[in-house]
Amino acid sequence: MDPPPAPPSRPSESETVATAVDAAAERIATAGCEDPRSDAEALVADVLGISPQELGRDGAGEVGPELAAAIEERVGRRAGHEPLAYILGRAPFRAIEVAVDSRVLIPRRETELLVGVAVELPEGARVHEVGTGSGAIALALISERPDLRVSASDLSPEAAQAARENAERLGLALEVIVEEGMPERFLGEEVDLVLANLPYVTDSTIYQRSPEIQREPRIAVTGECGEDGLGVIRGLVAEVRPGQRLAMEHDTHHGPAMRQLLREATTVRDHLGGERVTVGLAP
């Protein structure tokens, strides 16, 4: 059971930026969140319309009642374990920033490995991303390799719309298809690489993870993963044409199983050393 959120503080009219950050960090820490100081700085800076790096410069400045109330509201949401990215409404991903909300999974740093695989493709290669969510992977790839032909799909119409909105906001052209798995039109077409960060957390193990992940779309976190977490991944591998090259994110303990699932497979480790993305050919 999550610890109860700390009672809200009563901001005074003379509260400074520095004391606002301190109070926010204390409340978020009391709630058991992992990085309370960074979260507090991000939330206070966002309300003030500055970057977290500028907080020190403005630390002695006063925070009026209206801004203090806005900070209090956001800190309360974070203390209730709402993901920071949802509160801010955005998340960084490689060289871009995407808008995120409860329609989509929040892009993680480890998922950037999929883009790292794809940027090594030859000029003009064809890439399709399955399960695009916010569009972060496909859009980051287009921004770095505009010569590639990139498309994306998602089974969720809401997620597909979020990806389209991000593409428009970033000024990048991305076709997003609403369809489960590999879109039928691509099954007989030559696609150089299929990218996918599909659900791989099981219905039982999700409760062993941070409370924040339970606030993200369950269809994007667990889906129909089965007992070992590989159900959705196996489904895509079985669906694509034999010999199709795929790069797929998975849990860190899935590396051996993924190398058995794909031919000529290699696994890339994430920034923490865990086996995270496997690249190989469909059997």
Image: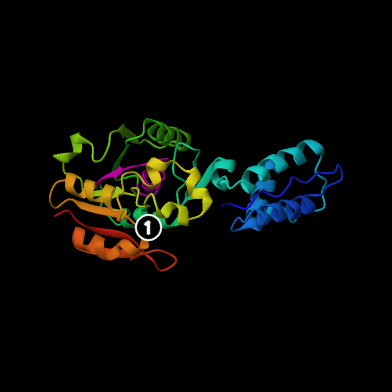
Q: Residue furthest bottom?
A: 273
> Residue 42, position in %: x, y?
64, 50
Q: Residues within 10 Å of mark 1 (few under 14, many from 20)?
A: many
Describe the element under mark 1 as helix, strand or loop.
helix
Q: How many marks?
A: 1
Q: Is residue 31 left or right of residue 86?
A: right
Q: Is residue 32 left or right of residue 107?
A: right
| Residue 50 in view, yes or no | no
* Residue range corresponding to the magenta coloring: 126-145
Q: Is residue 242 left or right of residue 20?
A: left
Identify the residue at horizontal 31%, vertical 61% (top origin). Answer: 254
Q: Residue furthest front?
A: 1
Identify the residue at horizontal 59%, vertical 58% (top origin). Answer: 34
Does residue 234 sit above or below 175 in this rendering?
below
* Viewer-side residue, 260 vs 266: 260
Q: Residue furthest right?
A: 14
Q: Which residue is mark 1?
A: 113
* Viewer-side residue, 189 vs 200: 200
> Residue 126, position in %: x, y?
24, 45
> Residue 231, position in %: x, y?
27, 49
User: Which kind of residue does numbered mark 1 sit on?
Assistant: Leu
Q: Give yes or no for residue 136 being in the magenta stretch.
A: yes
* Viewer-side residue, 3 vs 14: 3
Identify the residue at horizontal 81%, vertical 38% (top origin). Answer: 65
Does residue 111 sit above or below 69 in this rendering?
below
| Residue 176 in view, yes or no | yes
> Residue 24, position in %: x, y?
71, 51
Q: Give yes or no for residue 63 being in the magenta stretch.
A: no
Does residue 155 sit above or below 17 in this rendering?
above
* Viewer-side residue, 113 vs 203: 203
Identify the residue at horizontal 20%, vertical 58% (top origin). Answer: 261
